[in-house]
Image: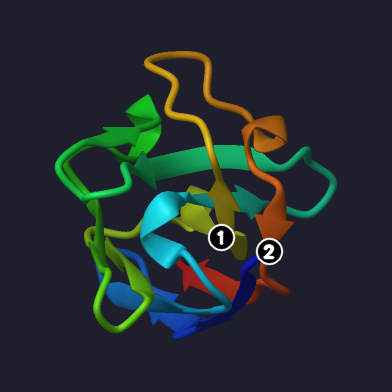
């Protein structure tokens, strides 16, 4: 089991950037696929992106492709979400998550078994 703690959320104007961090504790971090998901008020939790165990592969939902980048550091047990050209519709609570399986399409929240507490991202117009 891995314990996850997110940080880096905040308030930013549309067009701006934020970098979220996720610190993982527990054993075997490099054995986990890591993901970021978000939840806007009144909406279901939405998959944002994922990164493979080694970091060689990434996958993003269409709405963030070209704007968001996930990276990981398996030495520091960290995962990052760099968010550029933010839009108002990117507002939500962002969650870091860990899972065991890489899928090539159809990513969803139930692919992940461990979750952080979330960090709020608010994009103003």
Give the secondary structure at mark 1: loop
Tell me: residue 60, above or below residue 37.
above
Tell me: residue 69, above or below residue 75.
above
- Residue displayed at 31% across by 42% down: 52
Residue 105 point in image, percent of width and height = 43, 14
- State the residue position of label 1: 91
Q: CA distance from mark 2 to mark 1?
A: 29 Å
Q: Residue furthest right?
A: 42
Q: Do the residues under discs 2 and 1 have CB atoms within 8 angstroms?
A: no
- State the residue position of label 2: 1
Give the secondary structure at mark 2: loop
Residue 39 point in image, percent of width and height = 69, 51
Residue 68 point in image, percent of width and height = 26, 52
Tell me: residue 34, above or below residue 109.
below
Q: Residue furthest top?
A: 105
**Which corner quadrant holds the C terminus?**
bottom left
């Amino acid at each position: 089991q891995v314990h996850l703690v997110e940080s880096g959320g905040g308030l930013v104007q549309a067009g701006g950037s934020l970098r979220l961090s996720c610190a993982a504790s527990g054993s075997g971090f490099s054995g986990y696929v890591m993901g970021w998901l978000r939840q806007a008020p009144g909406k279901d939790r939405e998959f944002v992106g994922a990164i493979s165990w080694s970091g060689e592969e990434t996958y993003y939902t269409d709405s963030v492709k070209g704007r968001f980048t996930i990276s990981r550091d398996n030495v520091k047990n960290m995962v990052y979400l760099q968010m550029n050209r933010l839009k108002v519709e990117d507002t939500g609570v962002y969650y870091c998550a860990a899972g065991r399986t890489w899928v090539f399409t159809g990513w969803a929240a139930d692919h992940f078994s461990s979750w952080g507490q979330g960090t709020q991202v608010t994009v103003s117009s």
